[in-house]
Image (cartoon, rainbow, N blue to C red):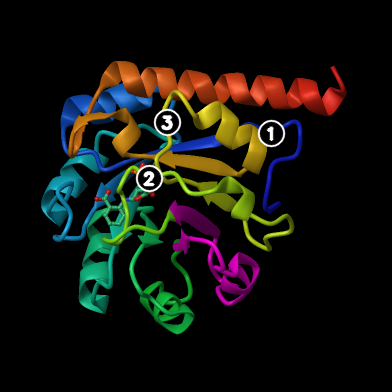
């Protein structure tokens, strides 16, 4: 799989931190490819596993559930994978490559979050997670993430050896710029489409997805030299 998009492809969209049925339905309607559930109790967007499983059951085919973990235990991860079929794991804490591989039992796909700041060696980081399906780029914040903070996109080098998911403070207003500059495989948004922690706004989600489609069209034009 390419790390960044070829000109024919479209940027995939993940919307994260959903807690309500209506928001899940609106995110799908807006065009999200993946829906994230925060399974870390330290987050204001946390949902219990039972609740996440209930919400995930609303997803139609081809829309993927994602479970966000911060330093979770193996039993917690196993329970999540049992409760939510086809769950993509998102490790957003201090998980080492060995821990990610063990937690995913070498079979379950996972993304590993990188906390971007000046001096951070993303190429080295990505190389050290050869089994990650993608590397998710978030801003370095005081907590573990989901802070709505944009990082300096010029810190993303070319040639990252894994598919890149751009996140960190994305919104309908800046995602076109982010897609055109970083050319990620996918984008991920939480704060930028919400009215309160874990409470999404259908209109913001619709505008976010529309902006990503607009970015894809502009990127294709640029690649054709128009
Ligand atoms: O959403 C959270 O509460 C959260 C908690 C701990 C780690 C990550 C979290 N969210 C993820 O952070 C990025 C960026 O989010 P934002 O758009 O800047 O709010 C995203 O991948 C979320 O999934």
Q: Is mark 3 within 8 Å of ligand 1?
A: no
- Tell whether 111 sits left or right of 49: right
Q: Which mark is residue 149?
A: 2
Please count the marks in the image.
Answer: 3
Q: Residue furthest right?
A: 225
- Name the residue tied to disc 3: 32
Ligand 1 within 8 Å of disc 2? The answer is yes
Q: Along the polypeptide, which appears first: circle 2 or circle 1?
A: 1
N-terminal-most mark, 2 or 3: 3
- Residue 74 position, x and y percent, is 27, 77
Q: Looking at mark 1, is its residue's CB closer than 8 Å to ligand 1?
A: no
Q: CA distance from mark 2 to mark 3?
A: 21 Å
Q: Secondary structure at mark 2?
A: loop
Report the residue at 55% width, 68% height from top.
120
Q: CA distance from mark 3 to mark 1?
A: 15 Å
Q: Position of residue 146 (x, y in %)?
A: 31, 49
Which of pointers 3 and 1 lies earlier in the amino acid sequence? 1
Q: Is residue 128 above or below residue 174?
A: below
Q: From the viewer's perspective, is 181 left or right of 172?
A: right
Q: Between residues 10 and 187, which one lies in front from this camera angle?
A: 187
Q: Residues within 10 Å of mark 1 (few under 14, many from 20)?
A: few
Quadrant of the image containing the C terminus: top right
User: Secondary structure under badge 3?
Assistant: loop
Start-end of magenta stretch: 112-138
The front one of 22 and 87 is: 22
Residue 202, percent from left and from top: 28, 19
Can I make out residue 29 in this image? no
- Residue at image location 32% in from the left, 55% down from the top: 145
**10 Å neighbourhood of mark 3: few (<14), some, or many (≥20)?**
many
């Amino acid at each position: 799989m390419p790390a960044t998009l070829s000109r024919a492809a479209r940027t995939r969209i993940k919307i994260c931190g959903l807690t309500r049925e209506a928001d899940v339905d609106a995110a799908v309607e807006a065009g999200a490819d993946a829906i994230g559930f925060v399974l870390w109790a330290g987050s204001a967007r946390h949902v219990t596993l039972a609740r996440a499983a209930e919400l995930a059951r609303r997803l139609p085919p081809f829309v993927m559930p994602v479970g966000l973990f911060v330093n979770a235990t193996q039993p917690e991860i196993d329970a999540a994978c049992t409760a939510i079929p086809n769950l993509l794991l998102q490790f957003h804490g201090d998980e080492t490559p060995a821990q990610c591989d063990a937690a995913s039992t070498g079979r379950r796909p996972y993304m590993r979050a990188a906390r971007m700041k000046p001096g951070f060696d993303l190429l080295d980081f990505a190389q050290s997670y050869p089994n990650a399906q993608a590397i998710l780029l978030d801003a370095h914040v005081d907590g573990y993430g989901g802070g709505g903070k944009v990082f300096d996109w010029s810190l993303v080098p070319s040639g990252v050896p894994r598919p890149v998911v751009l996140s960190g403070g994305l919104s309908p207003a800046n995602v076109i710029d982010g897609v055109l500059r970083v050319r990620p495989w996918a984008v991920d948004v939480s704060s930028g489409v919400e009215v309160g922690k874990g409470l999404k706004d259908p209109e913001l989600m619709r505008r976010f997805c529309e902006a990503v489609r607009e970015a894809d069209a502009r990127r294709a034009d640029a690649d054709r030299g128009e």
